[in-house]
Image (cartoon, rainbow, N blue to C red):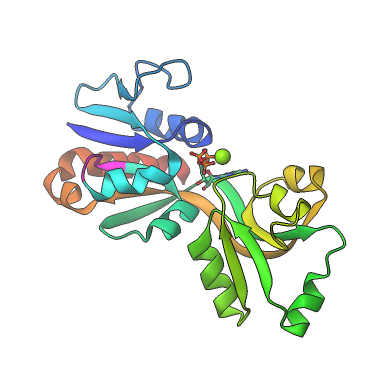
Amino acid sequence: MITIALSKGRIFEETSPLLEAAGVVPTEKPESSRKLILQTNQAEVRLIIVRASDVPTYVQNGAADIGIAGRDVLLEHGGVGLYQPLDLNIARCKMMVAVREGFDYAACLQQGARLKVATKYVKIAREHFAAKGMHVDLIKLYGSMELAPLVGLADAIVDLVSTGGTLKANKLVAVEEIMPISSRLIVNQASFKLKRQLIQPIIDAFAQAIA
Ligand code: ATP
Ligand code: MG
């Protein structure tokens, strides 16, 4: 038996065609089912539905053999104990620094001002600003980062941006790209050795499907 950990929403949607290419079709849709364990057409493959940021934890501990997680989530988690054989190039977006329209970020950089930065991605943000030699006070949030600069909680945010629509709707502008983000296949290292005959064909099918 192998267990694949996925999150609902874009990851599940963008992974479905890849799973199908590997011959794996869930018998129920996670969006319409309340079940957290989904059986598939293959007796030896099941899916579990977890929070996006919990996927590495399930795979690291062997509760799932395989998972799909964003680069953002993997960097925040640390990736210990995870084999990352494949960038699936799905759920693509960018990690960016954004500020209120009219906020002079360049001047702050130049003057070495100490910025308050709100983000869900504290590890990525800390490393980014440290590499630039900037002093920042990080404020951990769990969502709706766009609000923070509007109500004076922070000067800037570090967040994922795809179309920029949410930034624009909240009168924010992206001022710096930190890194491109996409989702990766992750595999428990012990599972990869012990269940190689089940796991390798899935990796191969995914690799072929994205080529
Ligand atoms: P949760 O909703 O559980 O708090 P989340 O918001 O990170 O977690 P999703 O929105 O499903 O969960 O995002 C899953 C992954 O998709 C993220 O980790 C990231 O890699 C990627 N992602 C996030 N936002 C976007 C976006 N706007 N466009 C493309 N990919 C994105
Ligand atoms: Mg989300």
Which residue is at the far left? Answer: 194
Quadrant in which residue 118 is drawn: bottom right
Residue at 62% from the left image edge and 78% from the top image edge: 135
Position in image of residue 175 (x %, y %): 75, 64
Between residues 72 and 85, which one lies in front from this camera angle?
A: 72
Image spot of residue 10 (x, y percent): 53, 35
- Residue 68 location, quadrant: top left
Left or right, 102 with respect to 161, comes to right
What percent of the width, then of the height, locates residue 167?
75, 48
Depth order, front residue of 193/36: 36
The residue located at (27%, 27%) in the rendering is: 46
Does residue 79 sit above or below 194 in this rendering? below
Say whether residue 129 is magenta: no
**Which one is nearer the viewer's eye here, 206 or 159?**
159
Farthest right residue in view: 102
Instruction: Please name the predominant secondary structure of the magenta segment in the image.
Output: loop
| Quarter of the image where ligand 2 sits | top right
Q: Quadrant of the N terminus?
A: top left
Q: Which residues are magenta?
A: 62-66
In this rendered view, identify the residue nearer to me: 88 or 35: 35
- Residue at x-position 44% and y-position 29%: 16
Q: Residue at x 38, y 35 (%)?
A: 50
